[in-house]
Image: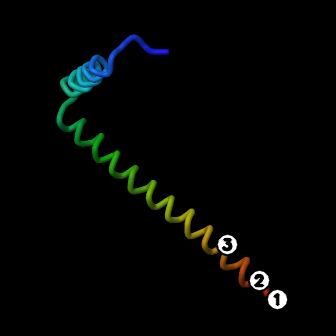
């Protein structure tokens, strides 16, 4: 089941969408979007590291309590 578009046509539509979007936005808006994306990515990494640390601590605590 296809959408009726070739890969080439979809690529053109995708490029056209981003070109129109960039034309409507100022450099400042683009910079702020990029900055917010970087901040979000940094927060996602921190959150993932916190989850991993919590898992590791849980395992350590369970292993420490088990031999008793």
The residue under label 2 is 65
Instruction: Please report the residue visible at 67 percent of the width from the left and 72 percent of the height from the top.
Output: 58
Dot 1 lies on which element?
loop
Real-space Cα distance between discs 1 and 3?
A: 16 Å
**Circle 1 crowding by C-alpha within 10 Å: few under 14, some 14–19, many from 20:** few
Q: Is residue 62 above or below residue 22?
A: below
19 with respect to 57 (left or right): left
Q: Are marks 1 and 2 in contact (CB under 8 Å)?
A: yes
The residue under label 3 is 58
Residue 50: percent from left, percent from top: 53, 65
19 with respect to 39 (left or right): left
Question: Who comes first in sequence, dot 1 or dot 3?
Answer: 3
48 with respect to 10 (left or right): right
Instruction: Please report the residue visible at 19 percent of the width from the left and 31 percent of the height from the top.
Output: 26
Instruction: Please report the residue visible at 23 percent of the width from the left and 37 percent of the height from the top.
Output: 30
Q: Is residue 5 above or below residue 23?
A: above
Disc sitting over residue 36 in the figure: none
Query: Farthest residue in the right direction?
Result: 68
The residue under label 1 is 68
Dot 3 lies on which element?
helix
Residue 56: percent from left, percent from top: 60, 72
Residue 55: percent from left, percent from top: 62, 68
């Amino acid at each position: 089941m296809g959408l009726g578009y070739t890969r080439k046509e979809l690529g053109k539509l995708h490029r056209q969408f981003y070109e129109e979007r960039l034309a409507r936005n100022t450099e400042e808006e683009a910079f702020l979007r990029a900055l917010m994306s970087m901040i979000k990515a940094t927060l996602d990494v921190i959150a993932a590291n916190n989850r991993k640390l919590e898992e590791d601590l849980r395992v350590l605590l369970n292993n420490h309590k088990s031999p008793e």
